[in-house]
Amino acid sequence: MQIQQNFSLKPYNTFGINVQAAYFSNFASLDELAELTEFCHKKNKLPQLVLGGGSNVLFTQDFRGIILKNELKGIDLIKEDLSYYYVKSAAGEDWHRFVLFCIDNNYAGVENLSLIPGNVGASPIQNIGAYGVETKDVFHELEAWHLQDKKLVTFAAEDCKFAYRDSVFKTKYKGQYVITSVTFRLLKQPVYQTNYGAIEQELTAMGITELSIKAISDAVIKIRKSKLPDPEVIGNAGSFFKNPTIPASRFESLKITHPTLPGYPAVDDLVKIPAGWLIEQCGWKGYRKGDAGCHEKQALVLVNYRNASGIDIYTLSNEIMHSVETTFGILLEREVNII
Ligand code: FAD
Ligand code: EPU
């Protein structure tokens, strides 16, 4: 473990924003994490930010504290019962590597979440979701290090208050814990989720006649690759905004002025509207100003073509929010963590 100073974060965030951290260190064990916590206390409670793959953050300024880069590794089957495998993964494992490990071992449930960038440790933070499945559907428990109390705490599913792109780690406990491991409850008998989006269509196009978790994973990977920009090529953090929900009555009245407005039933009798549609209707899709832009295939994804600053991207997000609110009366909420 080595603490570095005035460290560029450009390779550590998928937006590719070039900011500096006053301090930066990896940690590969709980002891190293505890040592770093101690270092921060001695340095007048230096601000700490844990980073996984950096695929859901937008840095708008230099970070004046220490970046704790999670390198905790290891995946283990810790128990099984009649219906489930309980698989514990260290938080620093790559999410997609974990998904592939599950598929190889016939542990079912995470196949629809293939190819989501980032680390296992971040998966409960915003309850990652795609193609009809969310972390909460396969979650058993997690362990997290409390930065102030310097102790390890276990969280069961109900403690995490999972919701659409949300959990206690984004709200009441924001910045207080470092998730060190997550245990997933995976099915012995798969229950295939193929009714979301273009999965059925993609499976047919691939000539799949017998379903398997591998086939679903392959289909999801194909769909994602066709729609979403690869951060290795164009900087981005996936969906920049959440899909908003509005009351059914408001949806019906908006349909009068915007007859093609799409909407899907959501919890509490609300209707979920695809933010990508709202943004496209306002004319932003494919827009570029300097190196900041709105992706040409997926309007929900803001991109850094090369040298945009975090402020450039943030300013563009403000302009988009303003125009969607003026046109539809709907206030978008950012999904990406602004630092
Ligand atoms: P980071 O960006 O490193 O961190 C995100 C936040 O979590 C930060 O606030 C950080 O401090 C905190 N954090 C990270 N690790 C820990 C930890 N161990 N303990 C405590 N706090 C921590 N998301 C979806 O839900 N569905 C998608 O389909 C999806 N598609 C994407 C596609 C692309 C191309 C990209 C670039 C992103 C996409 N995302 C998607 C967003 C992103 O992949 C997820 O949010 C992912 O979980 C972020 O993981 P990370 O390790 O990169 O987190
Ligand atoms: N749409 C448009 N124009 C666009 C983009 C989308 O009109 O430019 C409309 C279309 O009607 C389309 C609908 O939006 O049918 C939904 O689009 P898509 O299937 O691409 O999904 P999304 O709602 O834009 C959400 C998640 C993604 C996740 C996919 C698949 C959010 C904020 N985003 O995107 O998650 O991968 O569904 O489940 O919920 C992420 O969180 O970073 C992310 C990529």
Image: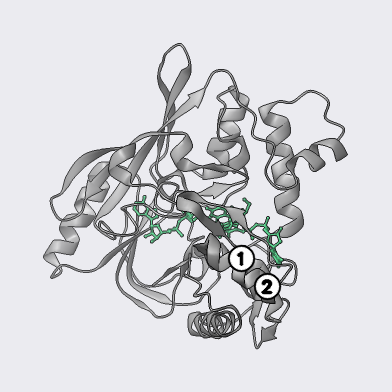
Residue named by callout 1: 252
Looking at the rendered structure, the kind of residue marked 2 is Ile
Looking at the rendered structure, the kind of residue marked 1 is Glu
Residue at the location (80% across, 42% down)?
202
Q: From the Cβ of disc 2, is ligand 2 less than 8 Å away?
A: no
The C terminus, quarter of image: bottom left
On the question of residue 235 being in view, the answer is no
Numbered mark located on residue 256 in the image:
2
Q: Is residue 50 above or below residue 328?
A: above
Q: Are marks 2 and 1 in contact (CB under 8 Å)?
A: yes
The outermost residue toward the top is 82
Marks 2 and 1 sit apart, C-alpha to C-alpha, by: 7 Å
Q: Is residue 101 above or below residue 3?
A: above
**Crowd tier of the residue under label 2, counting other residues whose Cα lies within 10 Å: few below 14, some 14–19, many 20 or above:** few
Quadrant position of residue 289: bottom right
Q: Is residue 315 above or below residue 15?
A: below
Quadrant position of residue 264: bottom right
Q: Is residue 169 left or right of residue 138?
A: left
Q: Position of residue 60 (x, y in %)?
A: 43, 79
Q: Position of residue 70 (x, y in %)?
A: 38, 51
Q: Position of residue 128 (x, y in %)?
A: 49, 49
